[in-house]
Amino acid sequence: MKIIMLGAPGAGKGTQAKKIAEKYEIPHISTGDIFRANIKGGTELGMKAKSYMDQGQLVPDDVTIGMLLDRISAADCANGYVLDGFPRTIPQAESLTKALSERGEKMDYAIDVNVPDEAIVTRMSGRRACLSCGATYHIVYNPPKKADICDVCGEKLVLRDDDKPETVQKRLTVYHEQTQPLIAYYKNAGILVTVDGTKNLNEVFKDITDVLGA
Ligand code: ADP
Ligand code: ADP
Ligand code: ZN
């Protein structure tokens, strides 16, 4: 099964993508996590991405598309995957469609996790991230067992630089301009599913699995 998660920054794409990946035993591929791992590792790709990310801008398509197409060619993607944070622009979506169709494949679902902007800023200011394993928490809605420590790997949790309110506003504007048009793109492709992302995280997950099936 091949799934795309759509939605504003902070809508809950990553949270749901992890649960989907676990239940259906497919890899969770987050372009944001790949960029953050590269920044942490001091790679050339990481250096390129960092200045854009810090400003709440998208990393250019020529960097991002190649990286993602390489990743989905890996052996662990043979039975599908859940994409979280890609595509984020129409050219990214078109490149993905084209690369898949060259192999006789297509995406199965694009799940739009719908949350209004007003709710996003609160979500983001309470988000805590593990930069080691990619896990995310929320200080109120999904707290770690031990304050500020990752349940999965024991690393210290952080408030991401780009989750500060000024940058979140910028990212929302970028989302509306560049990413929201993908909702119509996947509606036209006949694979769009919309879920109400304001429900609690288990309810959102149930709405998703009702569509994906057992
Ligand atoms: P969010 O939690 O807001 O959805 P992500 O972790 O997916 O954030 O992305 C963080 C940042 O990484 C984005 O603001 C952007 O700068 C960069 N990024 C991630 N995925 C992409 C992509 N597909 N295209 C361009 N930039 C991306
Ligand atoms: P995205 O990947 O779309 O940027 P995340 O999955 O990281 O979003 O979620 C953003 C923040 O909101 C995190 O702190 C997460 O724990 C929290 N969160 C996710 N889903 C819900 C929900 N349904 N209700 C309340 N908080 C949520
Ligand atoms: Zn961790």
Image (spheres, helix red, strand yellow):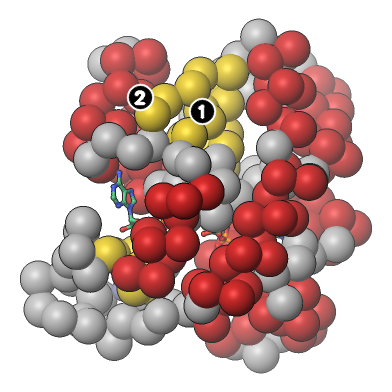
Disc sitting over residue 111 in the figure: 1
Q: Nearer the viewer, residue 61 or 182?
A: 182
Q: Nearer the viewer, residue 184 or 76?
A: 184
Quadrant of the rendered image containing residue 162: bottom right
Lower position in the chain sequence, tag 1 or tag 2: 1
Could you tell me which residue is drawn at 68 percent across and 65 percent down?
170
Quadrant of the rendered image containing residue 107: top right
Could you tell me which residue is drawn at 51 percent across and 78 percent down?
164
Q: Position of residue 73 (x, y in %)?
A: 68, 43
The reply to whether dot 1 and dot 2 touch (C-beta < 8 Å) is yes
Q: Amino acid at mark 2?
A: Ile
- Name the image quarter holding the C terminus: top left
Q: Amino acid at mark 1?
A: Ile
Q: Tell whether 70 sits left or right of 165.
A: right
Q: Is residue 196 visible?
A: yes
Query: What is the CA distance from the residue labelled 1 to the residue labelled 2?
Result: 8 Å
Q: In the structure shown, which secondary structural element does the residue marked by tag 1 occupy?
A: strand
Q: Is residue 130 above or below residue 109?
A: below
Q: Position of residue 125 (x, y in %)?
A: 39, 71
Q: Is residue 97 above or below residue 25?
A: above
Q: Is residue 112 above or below residue 55?
A: above
Q: Position of residue 113 (x, y in %)?
A: 47, 35
Disc sitting over residue 208 in the figure: 2
Q: In the structure shown, which secondary structural element does the residue marked by tag 2 occupy?
A: helix
Could you tell me which residue is drawn at 17 percent across and 69 percent down?
144
